[in-house]
Image (spheres, rainbow, N blue to C red):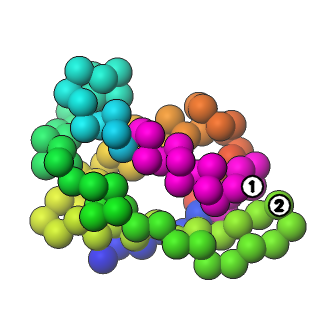
């Protein structure tokens, strides 16, 4: 299992999960804009299609403070971790920042 740590600064944990799930649903549709962007960037999403988001990316809130929530993203999809990480790095995280603000999520470490 691969983990990455992030801070949510301008959105709640639930808002983040809602956005993540919406983007994941778009990834499942080969005709969606995000799927088109994946093809342009050479990212093969076919191994991820049919996977539930929770089977590929598990998110856990570890601690919270004043307007900041620390989360752990665990990339757990057996056999397709690299595809999941590529989708996260090049498609999902940039889309979250575009939709919810550049400083809404920040990687730690």
Taking 82 as reference, is 28 above or below it?
above
Q: Is residue 86 left or right of residue 44?
A: right
Please state, as top left, top right, bottom left or bottom right, where the C terminus lies in the image: bottom right
Q: Residue at x 34, y 21 (%)?
A: 33
Please indicate, yes or no, whether residue 56 appears anywhere in the rendered image: yes
The answer for how far apart the CA atoms under marks 2 and 1 are is 6 Å
**Could you tell me residue 34's position as x and y percent?**
35, 28
- Report the front residue among 14 and 42: 14
Q: Residue at x 71, y 50 (%)?
A: 11
Q: Is residue 84 magenta?
A: no
Taking 16 as reference, is 44 above or below it?
above
- The reply to whether dot 2 and dot 1 touch (C-beta < 8 Å) is yes
Earlier sequence position, callout 2 versus callout 1: 1
> For residue 66, what is the image quadrant?
bottom right
Please give the residue where the numbered disc 1 appears in the rendered image. 9
Q: Residues within 10 Å of mark 2 (few under 14, many from 20)?
A: few
Please give the residue where the numbered disc 2 appears in the rendered image. 67
* Residue range highlighted in magenta: 7-23
Taking 11 as reference, is 59 above or below it?
below
Q: Residue at x 60, y 32 (%)?
A: 99
Q: How many marks?
A: 2
The secondary structure type at the circle numbered 1 is loop
**Could you tell me residue 80's position as x and y percent?**
17, 59
> For residue 54, what is the image quadrant?
bottom left
Q: Is residue 108 left or right of residue 39?
A: right
Q: Residues within 10 Å of mark 1 (few under 14, many from 20)?
A: some
């Amino acid at each position: 299992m691969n983990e990455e740590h992030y801070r949510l600064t301008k959105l709640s944990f639930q808002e983040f999960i809602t956005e993540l799930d919406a983007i994941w649903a778009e990834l499942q549709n080969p005709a969606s804009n995000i799927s088109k962007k994946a093809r342009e960037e050479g990212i093969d999403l076919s191994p991820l299609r049919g996977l539930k988001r929770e089977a590929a990316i598990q998110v856990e809130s570890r601690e919270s403070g004043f307007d900041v929530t620390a989360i752990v993203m665990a990339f757990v999809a057996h056999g397709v971790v690299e595809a999941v990480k590529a989708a996260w790095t090049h498609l999902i995280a940039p889309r979250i920042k575009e939709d919810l603000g550049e400083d809404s999520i920040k990687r730690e470490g």
